[in-house]
Amino acid sequence: MVSVLLSGCSSLESSSTNATDEIAGQSPIKNDELQWKWIVEAGKYEDFSFVDENWIAVKGGNGKYRVINTKGEAVLPDEYDEIYGFCEGIAMVNNDGKFSYIDKKGRSITEEWYQRAGQFSESRGSVQLKNKWGYINQSGELIIQSQYEEVKSFVGNRAAVKLANKWGFIDMTGRMVVKPQYDQVGDYSEGMAAVQLDGKWGFINSDGNLITALEYDQVKDQHEGYAAVMKNNKWGFIDTHGQVSVDLKYDDAGNFSEGKAAVKVSEYTEDGDAWAYIDYDGNIVIDFYPYTATEGRMIEVGEFKNGLAFVSKDLYSIIDSRGNDIFMGDSKFFISAFTYDKQFNVIPGYTFTDESMKVRKYGLLGLHGEQRLAPSFDFIGEMNGPYATVINVEDGVETKGIIEIYN
C-alpha cells in the first residue's frame, strides 16, 4: 500500500499562493516556528496509508488492515488484506486475492468478490468476472456486462474498453460510441482523447470523430485547451480543433499551466540545453535559461500553481510567474518535494548535520527558505492537510509514523 501520501482518489492537493503577492506584503506569510505531535507513533504499525481526509488504514501484527481516525479511534468494523482510498464514498478492499467494495460505514455494497477491480470514478467501478471486465454502480449492480478484455476508468462520461485486442470507448450506459479500432488510447481530457494506430497518434472528440490526422509520434493530454504533440523529434502544440497553435520546433515540451508551458531547445548555448516558458500563442514570456541540477538531482522545469513553479538552478529553486527568483536554495535547507502548502507556509526539505554532507535530517522550510519545522526526522513526506508521514532509522531499521503540525 502507498504509505506516504493519501491513498486513492481522495487526495488533498497542497494549496499554493501567488509569490508576488506575498513579497508585496498583501498576504503576509507565517514564519514562526511550528510544533508537532504524534498522530501515529513511529513503529506502532507495520504499514499505513491515508484512505480519506482523516482516516488511516493501519496494518497490525496479524497482517490485516483496519481503519482508524487521526485520534487513533477505530472507525470501520472489519479488517482486510488491503484497503484502498475512498473514491466517491466507496473504498475497494481485498481479501485472499479477491476484491469488493465498502461504503464509509463499512458496509459491503455488493456480495460479489471479483477477480480484480478498479476504484470508483464517475459513479462506476470496473470489475472482472470470469476474465472479462464490466462496471458496477454505487449500489453494487452490474450495469455494464462483463465482456471486455481490458478497461479503464470513466473520465468525461467515457471509458476506454478493449475488444479483440483493439481499444474503443463506451458511454455511461455501456453504449459503444467509438468502435474498437485503435492500438492504444488515452483518457478523455477537455473533450479530446489521444488515440494511436500503427504507431501514429492523433485525437478524437467525444463522438469519436478524428480532429487531427494520425500523424504524431508522441502526444500529451489537453491542458487549458492545448496539447503538446511531437513529430520528427520536434514538439509543438495543437488546440481543441486540432490546429497547430505553436509550431513544432522544440526539443521537448511540458503542459500548459496558468497560461504558460515550458519548452526546451537542445544545445541552446555552448553550455547545453535551455528551457523557456511560452504563452498560448507561442510567445516567450520567461526567457530561456540553462536549468541544471547537481549532485544527482533530476532537472526540474515545473508547472505553475498559483503563481509559483519549482525549477532546478543547480539546486531546487522557486520562481514566480514573471520568472523572478523567489527561493534560490540559499538557506541551510534543500527542497525535497515539489509541493508548497499555503496554509502552513511549508515545503518538505532537509539539511546536512555533518561536515562531509552525508547525514540528512528532514524538516519543513518556508517559501523563502526559513526554518518552519526543525529538521528532526530521517525523512518527511508531503503534507496531507496538517499531517505528514515521517521515517526514522535506528540501527538500520526504518520506522514510520504520522505527525500533525500546528502553530
Image (cartoon, rainbow, N blue to C red):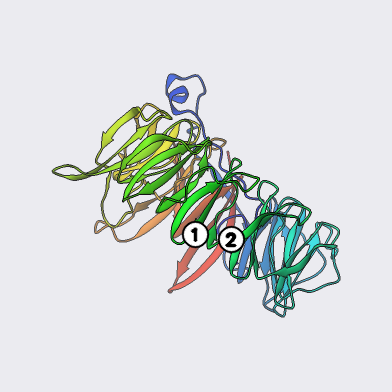
Residue at figure coordinates x 56%, y 38% from the top left: 15
The local secondary structure at tag 1 comes to: strand
Which quadrant is home to the C terminus?
top right
Query: What's the residue at 25%, 56% (across, down)?
Result: 355
Residue 382 % position (x, y): 52, 50
**Up/down of 1 relative to 261, above or below:** below
- Front one among 140 and 10: 140
Q: Nearer the viewer, residue 57 or 376?
A: 57
Residue density around tag 1, few if under 14, some if 14–19, many if 20 or more, within 10 Å? some
Of the image marks 1 and 2, the number of the one nearer the N terminus:
2
Amino acid type indicated by mark 1: Leu
Residue 354 in the image: above or below residue 21: below
Q: Is residue 179 left or right of residue 374?
A: right
Q: How many marks?
A: 2
Q: Amino acid at mark 2?
A: Gln
Which structural element holds mark 2?
Answer: strand
* CA–CA distance in space, label 1 to label 2: 8 Å
In the figure, residue 144 lies in which quadrant?
bottom right
* Residue contact between numbered discs 1 and 2, judged by CB atoms under 8 Å: yes
According to the picture, the residue beneath numbered tag 2 turns out to be: 181
Q: Quadrant of the N terminus?
A: bottom right
Instruction: Tell me the residue that label 1 is attached to.
Output: 197
Where is residue 401? Give x, y as percent: 57, 61
Q: Quadrant location of residue 41?
A: bottom right
Q: Sort mark 2 into few (<14), some (14-19) or many (20+) by Cα contacts within 10 Å.
A: some
